[in-house]
Image (cartoon, helix red, strand yellow):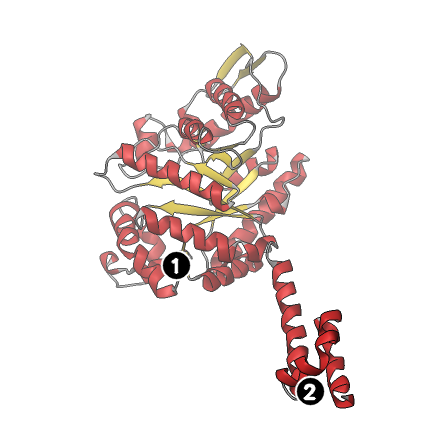
Amino acid sequence: MKFGMFMMPSHPPGENPTLAFERDLQLIEHAEKLGFDEVLIGEHHSGGWETVPAPDLMIAAAAQRTQRIRLGTAVVNLPYHHPFEVAERMAFLDHLTRGRLIFGVGPGALPTDFMLFGLDPNKLRPMMNESLEIITKLLEADEPISYDGEFWKIKDMFIQVKPLQRPLPLAMACGISGNSVEQTGKYGMIPMSASVFSPAGADMLQRQWAAIQESASRHGTVVPRESWRIAQPVYVAETNEQALEDITRGATREYHEYFFTLGLKGLFEDYPGQPIDEITTEQLKRKMGWLVGDPPTVTKMIRELHDGTGGFGGILFITNDWADQGKWMKSMELFARYVMPNFQGTAQGLTASWNALEEKARLWRAAIDAAGGIDKVMVNNLPKFGQDSIGRVAQAPAAADQA
């Protein structure tokens, strides 16, 4: 399983944006050092909380600070940009990252953003579809192409710098609309889904995956299950109580001041009669399925989510500014040390070796006790201990009796 980060990024209004961007870049560097696989960065233009308007520029900066970790857009909102410009910039960016780019796309979801551009929300998805068709042709074509669509028209256009990766990995933010899963299957894209950690949430994800596979089958593409990414808030601390305490202030503020203002109150209809401003962080965690707790708890939650969906290929941390930088970095370190190995097989050999040693040591101790204690065994069998392995020390009692 792969592990990455999805950075909207989100910071409380009123902070110094220069320092906030620097913290984001430091988290990307830290993620690479800890062995995370990828970081994907969002695009937003309004609202005060989500502050990166150009994820490609953020990726270019991060590429200069890293060597291995893959960097991606999550997402470029295609209706906001001319498709030729997007294709050319992404191909160029793939070279700047030395072939580490993941190109994620979407239609745009923040109402104040598409209002800023004067776009009809009912036209966002068809605009994205046309743009995506043009972009994929431009990325692959070795000769000029033309396109006469409802929203975009190009004539004899050609990008002179092709992506370093051929093909360039494409990803789609899969929401509740049928269009996103249809396009994912049509182009064989990496699906990026948001999870609600509940039986209903797992069922929704299963239906989403089935729709992607049905679309892929119709279009003759392949979307392997191991390419599927699930994005979810993740925070790990030494104890469950400490984890919830660490994020309570930041999470409560972000949801009450930002997400509820955007109209997400309907997600909490499970609490009829409770004023929205009285919803607690514990209720948010339970309802939204945050992967928050100590390492064993988070490991268990990921296993349950994996089993409930039928399996996926990666978890993306939704990195929110809910705790100070030091605590976020500590959370990432705890995850890398104690959660990742359970899904990547990196500690299986060590665990098996330790279990084998424990069994041999048990036999050794039993043999020593039967021989009359360590002093007697060492005096009467010292040469034998020098020659035999621990696994053969069970012969020691017989030798001691003969002595």
The residue at the far top in this view is 156
On the question of residue 269 being in view, the answer is: no
From the image, tell me which residue sits under label 2.
371
- Of tags 2 and 1, the one toward the viewer is 2
Secondary structure beneath dot 1 equals loop
| Residue 187 lies in quadrant | top right
- Identified by mark 2, the residue type is Ala
Mark sitting on residue 22: none
**Is the residue marked by circle 2 packed among few (<14), some (14-19), or many (20+) residues within 10 Å?**
many
Instruction: Please tell me how many numbered marks the rendered image carries.
Output: 2
The residue located at (40%, 53%) in the rendering is 331
The residue located at (50%, 58%) in the rendering is 338
Mark sitting on residue 237: 1
* Left or right placement of residue 10 versus residue 183 in this view: left
Q: Residue 277 at what x, y percent from top left?
A: 23, 56
* Left or right placement of residue 152 versus residue 8 in this view: right
Q: Between 210 and 368, which is closer to the camera in this rendering? A: 368
Q: Residue 237 at what x, y percent from top left?
A: 39, 59
Q: Between 265 and 16, which is closer to the camera in this rendering? A: 16
| Residue 334 lies in quadrant | bottom left
* Left or right placement of residue 280 versus residue 4 in this view: left
| Residue 119 lies in quadrant | top left
Q: Residue 321 at what x, y percent from top left?
A: 32, 46
Secondary structure beneath dot 2 equals loop
- Identified by mark 1, the residue type is Ala
Q: Between 304 and 403, which is closer to the camera in this rendering? A: 403
Q: Residue 269 at what x, y percent from top left?
A: 34, 58
Q: Earlier in the sequence, mark 2 or mark 1?
A: 1
